[in-house]
Amino acid sequence: MPSVTLPVIATPALLSWIRGHPQLPLHSWYFIAGVTLSVLNRPDEIPKVFKYAMEKGASRADSRPGHDEQLQIARKMREALVKAAPIGGLPKAINALFALKSATPPALLDEPLGYSPTARPVEIYDVPSSTILHRGQTFFDKVYGKVSKRVMGQMDRSGTEDLGITARLMYGYILSNTSILTAAESSYVLIAGLIPQDTVVAANGQLEVNPQLKGHLKGALNNGATAEQVKAVREIIIRICEASGMTRLGDTVPGGWGWRGEVANL
């Protein structure tokens, strides 16, 4: 078969526009971009984002970051890719993290058996599971608000109670850990993991916007983000997806690379 040339996504022009977006939360553009690229299955583009952040910094002003800020950027990108695993899939997270590592200086890596900025190894082995699961349930309740019991109950009654157990484990041990990413930043990760995944077909055969995305857009508000910030996060994710070749598909188009419905919004 002839080789396929993939489009270049993370161009300097696109990265400059994303970093300079006036409504985007500070220190978020690079990990949102990294997660989006991971879910798009373009881990090869992630080092470009990281190197650009290393050169330009996390803020809107051009300023080469010092070691402490570089370490913060590296850790936020890694944590975002870890938190994207429950949304986009572990294989994509693995590929993305190794792509990121290939571009990361040794001084900015957190190696095994050393200091863990997330303390997850301690949580796994030394903290009672009930404590972590309670934290996860609290995070879940904050994200989904008044409908949280109904959402979790639906998962428990999905045909296997194991779906609810899986959600509790992911929220407990992965998503509710806010040592590196805040609750709002964690919501941005979930949004970035969902937008590239298109719409779904409902039981009645009608196309619906991704129901999980709608919940997590509102969840970002519940976690402290402003509506303007959430809309800006959504906007840059869509722009990255479009740069990858995604487009709005017609309702009658049987296949293609894009969205079958309008991307959910606030």
Image (cartoon, rainbow, N blue to C red):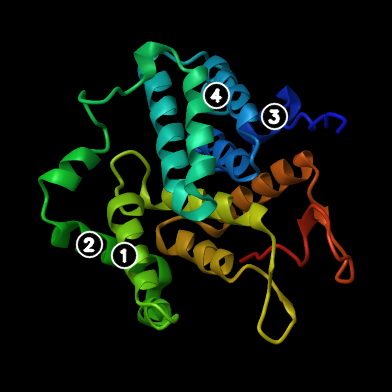
The mark found on residue 10 in the picture is 3
Q: Amino acid at mark 4?
A: Phe
Q: Quadrant of residue 80?
A: top left
Q: Earlier in the sequence, mark 3 or mark 4?
A: 3
Say if mark 1 contacts mark 2, CB within 8 Å. yes
Image spot of residue 194 (x, y percent): 58, 56
Label 1 – label 2 distance at C-alpha? 6 Å
Q: Say which amino acid is labelled 2.
A: Leu
Disc nearest the viewer among 4 and 1: 1
208 is higher (above) or lower (below) than 178: below
Name the element at disc 3. loop
**Horizontal and vertical percent for residue 14?**
72, 31
Say which label, 2 or 3, has the lower sequence index.
Answer: 3
Splitting the image into 4 quarters, where does residue 165 fall?
Answer: bottom left
Q: Position of residue 9 (x, y in %)?
A: 73, 32
Disc 4: CA contacts within 10 A as few (<14), some (14-19) or many (>=20) = many
| Label annotation for residue 51 | none
Please give the residue where the numbered disc 2 appears in the rendered image.
133
Picture quarter containing residue 191? Answer: bottom right
Element at label 2: helix
Q: Which mark is residue 168?
A: 1
